[in-house]
Amino acid sequence: MIHQDDSMIFEVDGLQIKGKIIIAKDIDRKGIIVQLEKLHWPKVDIPPEPQNITKVSSKYPALHVWIGDFIYDGIPLGESSIEVRPVADGIMVEKFNTKSNLMSLNINGNWYRDEGSHGLSKFNIIMTSKDIAQFLEKLGFQAPISEAQTIIDMQANWPGFPSPV
């Protein structure tokens, strides 16, 4: 850990992660900055959610993330950036952008903390791919099509958190 006048810097260097995390002393205004050369995140089996979850706090900092080489569960997502900030009724994902040889993904939206027992996620998602079959195969699906350029533009919402991890 490196102490500076205005922040603390944590450097991480391992087989699956390399980079730094910067936590500003003025965290409420500046948030947390994550700059990673690589993040190779294996799939995590999430146990079923407990029935009695207390409401999530509204006191969390903004999060600014850049990842040079992002791989999730063996799926190469390429260069990624994420901007998340708290809002009065939950969190706003201003952007989650990722671009690899398989696809380009742009997401923005909100998680509303007080909607239902676990909140409500509402997101705009645009995905483009030069060859959707390659992407689907990485997800474990048989692709009945090949070399098909694809654009998916959707508005999605679901009960609960944006992600189980």
Image: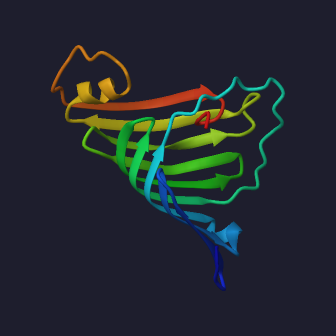
- 19 or 32: nearer the viewer: 19
Which image quadrant: the N terminus? Answer: bottom right
Percent coordinates x, y for residue 29 in the rendering: 66, 70
* Corner quadrant of residue 5: bottom right
Q: 67 left or right of 131? A: right
How many callouts does the rendering have?
0
Q: Is residue 21 above or below residue 96?
A: below
Q: 116 left or right of 73? A: right
- 110 or 129: nearer the viewer: 129
Percent coordinates x, y for residue 39 in the rendering: 46, 51
Q: 102 left or right of 51? A: left
* Corner quadrant of residue 105: top left
Q: Is residue 59 above or below residue 54?
A: below
The residue located at (45%, 35%) in the rendering is: 73
- 31 or 154: nearer the viewer: 31
The residue located at (24%, 43%) in the rendering is: 101
Please, which residue is most extreme toward the front here? 15
Q: 103 left or right of 162? A: left
The residue located at (20%, 35%) in the rendering is: 130
Percent coordinates x, y for residue 142 in the rendering: 30, 15
Percent coordinates x, y for residue 58 in the rendering: 76, 51
Q: Is residue 119 above or below residue 108?
A: above
Which image quadrant: the C terminus? Answer: top right
The residue located at (55%, 29%) in the rendering is: 157
